[in-house]
Image (cartoon, coloured by chain):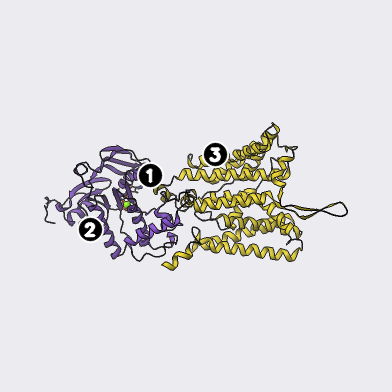
Amino acid sequence: MLDTASQNTPLIQMMDIDKQFGGVHAVQGVSVDLYPGEVVGVLGHNGAGKSCLMRMLSGAMTLSGGQINVNGTTVEFKSPQDAKKYGIETIYQTLALANHLDAAANLFLGRELKTRFGNLDEARMYAETKEALRQLNPNFKNLKDPVSKLSGGQRQVIAIARAIYFQAKVLVMDEPTAALGPSETAMVADLTIRLKNEGIGIFLISHDMHDVFDLCDRVIVMNKGRNVGAFAIGDVNKDDILSLIIKGTLPDDWTPRGQAA
Amino acid sequence: MAANDGKSKLSFLPSGSTLHKISALLTLLLLILAFSFTSPAFLTVNNGLTVLLQTSVIGLLAIGMTMVIITGGIDLSVGSVLALAGVVAGLVIKAGVPVIPAMALGIMAGAACGFVNGLVITKMRITPFVATLGMMMIARGIALQLTGAAPISRLGEAFGTLGNGTFFRVVEMQDNGFPKVIFAGVPYPAVLLIIVAIIGAFLLQKRQIGRHIFSVGSNEEAARLSGVNVDRTKIWAYTASGALAGLSGMVLMSRLVTVQPNEGVMYELDAIAASVIGGASLMGGVGSISGSMIGSFIIGVLRNGLNMAGTSAFIQQIIIGIVVIGAVYIDQFRNKK
Ligand SMILES: Nc1ncnc2c1ncn2[C@@H]1O[C@H](COP(=O)(O)OP(=O)(O)OP(=O)(O)O)[C@@H](O)[C@H]1O
Ligand SMILES: [Mg+2]
């Protein structure tokens, strides 16, 4: 999967991205790229514009300005389907689950499996869902309950399972472990590493510094809609990142820290 | 977990509404029981067939209404669309078109009204309440304008077949030379209702479009992010509702063997009531065809039974109103939990 060509062309190039809502400038001139087999952390304070930036990559939001390239070709996503066609799967911060439907219906929503007569293939969707969820949470029960009856963590597991089920090439994870317990969080961390080793490119939004330092190869930090820093994870430590997140600048005495961190 | 797998097959999508459906069914049975005591003629085969016939128009409307309600919308235009579809069929028959293609045109006129509803709602971003309220006035206006508010009669015997024909009618010649009706026969409209209800339930439960209808009403944004074409799904639901309004227009006008441009006033309210009594939630995401059929029959049985018991039309209104509020009360109670 990791041939040299794909190593050299970024999977994703987001260039000079802008997003405005009326007067609110949610994202301003942000550029970031992503290579196969790497995890790029997108960090920033609440309301910094992380989700907006990623939603534009997912096709959930249109760009006000800028350009997105996938494997070197410029794309224009009009809908989430368009992004999915390029193998971009997203775990949304809001989870994006239909509460009245059960786990299988949500996992396959918009991409239902059908029998040869074109009917919904409930049995197959159920079996696949069971298997997909088992990998993330072996104790997952009540598969047939509407997801409104599930816990926040179980719902998040469904959202994660959905994103990885369809063989993503690019995975956008917007605070994927916010509602998870420690063992599920560890499982998502393992999963992230496994996917990365398979050559998938991952954008990870997280407020958890442990996750960031354990999983990310690079980070970008956003502050008030701007990109205020992009670093290899070895060049910064936790204090540097916190300073960027909070003040938007590095500590005054900063020099690249090499592999020291 | 293995024990879970078997039993849950039965109660798939609207699992929360199963309870509601059972209580609605019990209500229906109680009503039938009560009316059997108040009027001896109520619980007879022939009266049962009459109820079937009377309920078929509301039932057909309720099938489309339920789909729309599950998307989180409402269709106030069906009563008027029913009339307009009838007028279209009547006029083209007068122009020399045979009955069957004429009725097909009527149904298509209904579907076209529904399609316009869907476009106005999705492309112009007008709320369903306002969009279909507008269509309610527009369709009624067109129906009255085209006919000068006068009924269209003398449409020929064939036009009356759909509404008045029956299967398995048994008539016996008596010794005195007069025919005696042994079994009034199953009315065509009742058979039509059953067929359409089965198709509707099949579409909602077994096909992708049904799944998408539920998802749009459950969480429109989630549906969109998951790749569901929300606009197309809504347009589909309103078009189906319009087409079914057209079909029920054919049934009703055929039964009267006359096209009445002012028929069907307030039928949308009966259809909404039937859906809601049957457990559909106006918040979207919940509802079923079987529930709405039970709801339609509750209304049909109430009307018929109260009629037989000699209750005035005004009292009937009051009672049905109370039933609707009671059903919604139960609905809210359920949603709170
Ligand atoms: N649909 C919208 N309409 C208007 N403003 C929006 C919309 N979505 C986001 N915003 C605004 O854009 C800004 C960035 O929001 P965004 O959700 O990207 O923040 P975030 O970095 O993901 O924050 P958090 O860490 O809290 O998730 C905020 O000021 C928000 O109010
Ligand atoms: Mg966010």
Disc 2 target residue: A209
Q: Chain of mark 1?
A: A
Which chain appears yellow? B
Amino acid residing under circle 3: Val
Amino acid residing under circle 2: Met
Which callout, 2 or 1, points to the residue nearer the camera?
A: 1
User: Against A48, is B116 above or below?
Assistant: above
- Badge 1 residue CB within 8 Å of ligand 1: no
Q: Chain of mark 3?
A: B
- In the figure, the shade used to draw chain A is purple
Measuring from the top left, give residue B54's x and y in whole percent.
69, 52
Measuring from the top left, give residue B186's x and y in whole percent.
70, 53
Q: CA distance from mark 2 to mark 3?
A: 53 Å
Work out whether disc 3 and disc 1 sit on a shared chain: no
Disc 3 target residue: B116
How crowded is the residue under tag 2: few (<14 C-alpha within 10 Å), some, or many (20+)?
Answer: some
The residue drawn where x is 39% and y is 53% is A96
SS class, disc 3? helix
Give left or right: position of B219 versus B262. left
Disc 1 target residue: A81
Which callout, 3 or 1, points to the residue nearer the camera?
A: 1
Q: Is residue B92 visible?
A: yes
The residue drawn where x is 71% and y is 55% is B49
Q: CA distance from mark 2 to mark 1?
A: 32 Å
Q: Chain of mark 2?
A: A
Work out whether disc 2 and disc 3 sit on a shared chain: no
Measuring from the top left, give residue A186's x and y in whole percent.
26, 62
